[in-house]
Amino acid sequence: MFMDMIIFMIQPMSILFRSVARIVLPAVFVISFSTSAFAIDGSLNENDAEMLQASRGAGRSSRVSLSDDEAQLYRLIMDYRRSEGKPAIPVSPNLSRVARLHVRDLEAHPPSGSCNLHSWSEYGPWKPVCYSGGESVQRMWSKPRELTSYSGNGYEVAAYTSSGRMFPDHALSLWEGSSAHDAVITNSGKWDRLQWNAVGVAISGSYAVVWFGEESDRSGR
């Protein structure tokens, strides 16, 4: 049986957790009903369309060029947030860049041993991180500031499938199935006092990652 994995990192309001949960779930082969940025009926949600367009509006360095799968994952997450009474989140050019860099690093250099999916390899223009809690937490959170002009921390959820390809709806279903991931995505539980004002998404091969941030991404304006 193929196995899928989701990883999360949680920061309570004033306490740094030093642990990371690893959840292994049985794989479900999900046929993606669409590989585009459009809704099930073929129409793009008006609010999502405006956010995607705004994120592309301020010049070459601020443009977001999402793949079909990435745009679908963004739309699915926003639809899910709305169903939970939460507002949509603007796409962040900077957090999307971080997400894309990380997902491709994961695909090319999968972490091993005590280093989980929040780890960054030594083979890129970044400081390597073997994420296993402790001091590595801050080094992961600071990746948006290290790699882009984004001014705040970034908080990541990540998913892996051994089936060979991660589909957008399968990634979201894995996160929805974990109460900890669900809380991050919907700003509930320990995250209810935070408000996400920026989000970056990326899918490549067997991996999907989403980065959330409290600070707005001014590069997308």
Image (cartoon, helix red, strand yellow):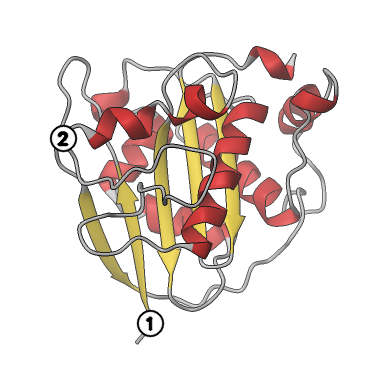
Q: Is residue 153 visible?
A: yes
Relative height, residue 202 to residue 156 (above, below): below
Circle 2 is placed at which residue position? 134
Quadrant showing the N terminus: bottom left
Amino acid, disc 1: Phe
Lateral position of residue 107 relative to residue 4, left or right: right
Amino acid, disc 2: Gly
Front-lying residue, 1 or 83: 1
Residue drawn at the location 62% of the way across and 28% of the way down: 94
- Can you tell which of label 2 and label 1 is closer to the viewer? 2
Residue drawn at the location 57% of the way across and 45% of the way down: 101
Quarter of the image for residue 55 reads top right
Task: Calculate the distance from the C-alpha at mark 2 to the C-alpha at mark 1.
Answer: 31 Å
Query: What x and y, as percent, mark residue 19?
Result: 15, 42
Front-lying residue, 109 or 182: 109
- Of label 2 and label 1, which has the lower sequence position? 1
Query: What x and y, as percent, mark residue 217?
Result: 61, 17
Local secondary structure at mark 1: loop
Front-lying residue, 104 or 181: 104
Contact (Cβ within 8 Å) of mark 2 with mark 1? no
Query: What x and y, as percent, mark residue 172?
Result: 48, 53
Query: What x and y, as percent, mark residue 53?
Result: 81, 28
Circle 1 is placed at which residue position? 2
Q: Is residue 91 visible?
A: no
Relative height, residue 11 to residue 69 (above, below): above
Quadrant showing the C terminus: top right
